[in-house]
Image (cartoon, helix red, strand yellow):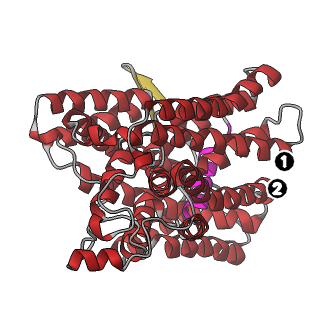
């Protein structure tokens, strides 16, 4: 009788589409705090408040999204939107999740490009860099606590860090190698490679699937349908690659637009491990290979993404904007930047729809695949080393004004010139670390406080400490 009563209390097994759009818009507006905070917020609204789906179905979808390249929070929104309202539900949920961040970063990128050299603006971003460095260190510790639970996992993290920082191995190769090691470990049933749950999503009182709008049964449209999966994936694949091909054919494959489209399209298929892992790859390629940005500017972009709603990886839009702004290929710099920002966002996020629409109907088979889950666990361990590399790379460029590259015995190390230490940056970074780790100051207050400190320094001294 209790179950029947719970079922009768629900108005129907569906939510009106217009109502669902309003809920997804609300989620998009509140999507601060990186993937962990965004997933926790979605859980609170969709599971605990709205009861669209239950605890187990939510975690089942999340585990699948964690197997995929790309931002898992946006993919989870696409997955649940698709479960609730078929294809249009997935399309709308995913688009709305990205839209606030896209508009925010575009506006901030324009302001940065036009006024970034103004004293007060430079001071604001100077302060922001110190806070972002601490936020990345927090990410290392958070992911490490979840992923490094055995000696082999610690060894994978150390190996990934050494491969990237010391030997300059390509990020995709590190991820592929870690996945293969985990896959083999899973096939051999080694306990160290058994995956853990993602992002620690928990509920004080578990919401049963039977007591939700979707119920326990799989909706008819969510059952495997190879024709539908392949047809819609083919359409999305064409939409994904068409702008890149157009840029290459019309402007030349050496143009900034073609390079941006190709690079971020490649990034979209290797972005395992979350935004911080990917940003190490993006930052080093954008700065050292393509010269779209300076190291300090990458930190500025990350600070923008941390303080605006939407996926953290939306910082790639800023990278693409600045790359084309400085290499406009016959257009005005501002027009080139806006178009490149749009192109970057398109090729970064559109593939997420392919991964969900192609694979979600078959996700039950993946759920029980021990070897695939072990590969995910190994990738998660390697990601700790990747993020540590990002933290160290950022830290060196925040705290020191000059770097030298040492090449010897097959190694390629970038080391700081000790005499070039930026004392103001060091003091502010130390204060940010104390605020975050000792007094548990949240991310947004930390970013705002450090930005305010940078502006105050400028007002008192009339200058900003030089940063790379």
Q: Which numbered circle lies on residue 300? A: none
Circles 1 and 2: CB atoms closer than 8 Å: yes
The residue labelled by disc 1 is 334
The residue labelled by disc 2 is 114
Distance between the alpha carbons at the discs numbered 1 and 2: 9 Å
| Vertical position of residue 50 compared to residue 64: above or below | below
Of circles 1 and 2, the one toward us is 1
Disc on the earlier residue, 1 or 2: 2
Q: Quadrant of the N terminus?
A: bottom left
Identify the element where label 1 is drawn: helix
Look at 28% across and 34% down and name the residue there.
159
Q: Is residue 293 visible?
A: no
Identify the element where label 2 is drawn: helix
Locate residue 452 relative to residue 114 in the image: left or right: left
Look at 82% across and 23% down and name the residue there.
250
Q: How many marks?
A: 2
| Vertical position of residue 242 compared to residue 89: above or below | above
The magenta stretch spans which residues?
A: 292-306
Mark 1 surroundings: few (<14), some (14-19) or many (≥20) residues within 10 A: some
Q: Is residue 293 magenta?
A: yes
Look at 33% across and 63% down and name the residue there.
215
Locate residue 166 relative to residue 312 in the image: left or right: left
């Amino acid at each position: 009788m209790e179950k029947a009563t719970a079922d009768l209390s629900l108005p129907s097994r569906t939510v009106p589409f217009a109502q669902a759009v309003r809920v997804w818009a609300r989620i998009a507006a509140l999507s601060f705090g990186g993937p962990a905070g965004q997933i926790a917020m979605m859980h609170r609204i969709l599971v605990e408040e709205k009861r669209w789906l239950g605890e187990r179905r939510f975690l089942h979808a999340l585990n699948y999204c964690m197997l995929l390249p790309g931002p898992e929070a946006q993919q989870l929104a696409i997955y649940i939107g698709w479960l609730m309202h078929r294809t249009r539900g997935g399309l709308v949920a995913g688009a709305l999740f990205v839209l606030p961040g896209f508009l925010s970063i575009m506006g901030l990128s324009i302001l940065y490009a036009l006024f970034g050299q103004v004293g007060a603006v430079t001071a604001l971003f100077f302060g922001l860099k110190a806070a972002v460095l601490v936020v990345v260190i927090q990410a290392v510790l958070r992911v490490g606590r979840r992923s490094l639970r055995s000696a082999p996992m610690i060894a994978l993290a150390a190996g990934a860090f050494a491969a990237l920082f010391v030997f300059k191995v390509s990020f995709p190769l590190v991820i592929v190698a870690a996945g293969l090691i985990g896959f083999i470990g899973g096939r051999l049933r080694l306990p160290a490679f058994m995956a853990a749950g993602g992002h620690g999503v928990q509920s004080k009182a578990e919401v049963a699937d039977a007591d939700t709008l979707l119920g326990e049964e799989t909706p008819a449209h969510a059952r495997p349908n190879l024709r539908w999966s392949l047809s819609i994936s083919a359409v999305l694949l064409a939409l994904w690659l068409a702008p890149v091909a157009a840029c290459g054919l019309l402007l030349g494959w050496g143009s900034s637009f073609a390079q941006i489209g190709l690079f971020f399209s490649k990034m979209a298929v290797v972005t395992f491990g979350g935004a911080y892992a990917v940003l190490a790859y993006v930052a080093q390629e954008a700065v050292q290979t393509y010269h779209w940005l300076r190291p300090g500017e990458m930190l500025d972009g990350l600070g923008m993404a941390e303080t605006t709603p939407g996926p953290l990886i939306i910082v790639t839009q800023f990278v693409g904007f600045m790359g084309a702004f400085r290499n406009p290929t016959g257009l005005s710099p501002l027009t080139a930047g806006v178009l490149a920002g749009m192109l970057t966002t398109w090729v970064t996020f559109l593939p997420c729809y392919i991964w969900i629409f192609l694979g979600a109907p078959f996700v039950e088979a993946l759920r029980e695949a021990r070897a695939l889950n072990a590969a995910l666990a190994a990738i998660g361990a390697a990601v700790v080393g990747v993020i540590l590399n990002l933290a160290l790379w950022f830290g060196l460029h925040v705290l020191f004004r000059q770097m030298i590259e040492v090449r010897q015995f097959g190694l390629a190390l970038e080391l700081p010139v000790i005499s070039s230490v930026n004392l103001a940056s060091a003091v502010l970074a130390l204060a940010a670390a104390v605020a975050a780790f000792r007094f548990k100051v949240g991310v947004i207050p930390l970013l705002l406080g450090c930005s305010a400190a940078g502006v105050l320094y400028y007002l008192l001294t009339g200058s900003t400490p030089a940063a790379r």
